Image (spheres, coloured by chain):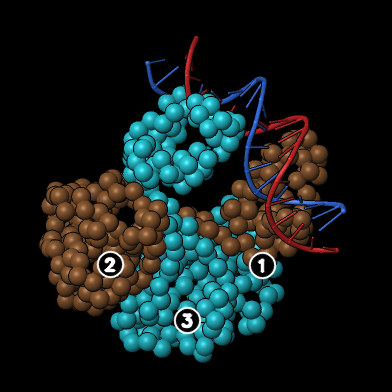
Chain colours: A cyan, B brown, C blue, D red
Amino acid sequence: MHDEVLRRIHTRRWKPGELIPSEADLAREFGCARATVNRALRELAEDGLLERRRKAGTRVAMHPVRKATLEIPIIRTEIEAKGLAYRYSLISSELTAPPPDVRARMQAAPGADMLHLAALHLANGRAYVFEDRWINLQAVPEAAEADFSRISANEWLVENVPFEGGDIAFSALAAGPREAGILSCREGESLFVIDRSTWMGDATITMVRLIFAPGYQMHTEL
Amino acid sequence: MHDEVLRRIHTRRWKPGELIPSEADLAREFGCARATVNRALRELAEDGLLERRRKAGTRVAMHPVRKATLEIPIIRTEIEAKGLAYRYSLISSELTAPPPDVRARMQAAPGADMLHLAALHLANGRAYVFEDRWINLQAVPEAAEADFSRISANEWLVENVPFEGGDIAFSALAAGPREAGILSCREGESLFVIDRSTWMGDATITMVRLIFAPGYQMHTEL
DNA sequence: GAGTGGTCTAGACCACTGT
DNA sequence: CAGTGGTCTAGACCACTCC
């Protein structure tokens, strides 16, 4: 069912922009229940291949906005999945007041201290990614007790703190003196960067910047 | 239903790694049909929050591999969605034999020419992204007739050529002389890059490298 | 073998929305 | 207001996989 509809889209029997038969008609044509048709069409709509509106019917998407699904793994898992040896090193950990931009984006109380961590993840002994993170202790008080010299905040948070949502931004950054020193690369080299923040309820839990060593590629399929 | 299960995960009433009741049990508890429970749990499993195995049952994911869904829009649409004026400029178009790495990745016949395009997309008159693309004319012969000085290959392909899948890689690149010239930036500046290829059946349709002007961020939510 | 999820059927009511 | 998709019920059979 799902596959047959997909075939009709790919073979252009149903062309982009075209209205396709209603669920009831398709159920009759395929000799199956409407629920089956509904599920197939709903899945294809979630994949961006169909556009559905009540009363108006179902159309083949004019511009199939393909959605790439990025899996965001724990860094240790990502490195070990490549068959490399993982090592982790805490660079610094301090309780301090965040700079204004961080405080603003985390909607934190003016006087409150936060946990600021810097750490390096290594693959086969070579710098892989530098993690610069702020943790909101008002939202996650138990983070004050965690031993981030043993386990990375990345891993500890995923295992211990549930979250409802967050946002991610990907960009490129030229290595400054600090990044060059930590990642053992030349100043000015082009580095891949992920900025991420996660929230639960109305509290921002953590903000992190991941700066990857030169040559890093993030890969996914369509 | 879906939301209530989500609540139980977030409030840790069901903890990571824990086995939750079977669909039949939950249907009794919630006083609803098993199909309803099934749909809710299936969706949460697709989001990476649950792990399901026949006979073994359903568990709360230990490491909730959150999946960020990237929407890959047409460049014109992306620029216009930001409220900026879109302009497009074809830099070069030639029919030529691809370099060995391109030919290898596209699994093309040794002697075959391909269409090689270079183009610039502008937002409010400023360089936004440089598009360097190869199109496999064996897979898409009608591309030879298209007028890529009028419509970008990006847009033409999305509208005219269906595809089954592809892969995307994101990385960072230091601007060389060519990129600096085209994107009006300094040599050595750090640029965000997307490499994408798409296929249909067993033929690779196109390979494209998108090099974005400095400061570009790709953004999504979790 | 037994218990789980995966998928389907047949039917129902509802919510939205274009005409 | 009529037609569409959105969601649900109650029941069934099957496929897989752990024991």
Q: How far apart are marks 2 and 1 (CA)?
A: 46 Å
> To which chain does the residue with label 2 belong?
B
The numbered disc on residue A128 is 3
Few, some or many residues within 10 Å of mark 2 (<14, 14–19, 20+): many
In front: label 2 or label 1: 2
Residue B36 seen: yes
Few, some or many residues within 10 Å of mark 3 (<14, 14–19, 20+): many
The numbered disc on residue A159 is 1
Residue A38 seen: no
Q: Residue A198 at what x, y percent from top left?
A: 55, 60
Q: Where does label 2 land, which residue? A: B108
Q: Is mark 2 on a helix, strand or loop?
A: loop
The numbered disc on residue B186 is none
In front: label 2 or label 3: 2
In the image, residue A210 above or below residue A178: above
Residue at 54% across, 81% down? A83
> To which chain does the residue with label 1 belong?
A
Q: Residue B8 at what x, y percent from top left?
A: 72, 50
Q: How far apart are marks 3 and 1 (CA)?
A: 22 Å
Amino acid bearing label 1: Glu
Q: Residue A118 at what x, y percent from top left?
A: 52, 79
Left or right of residue B203: residue A145: right
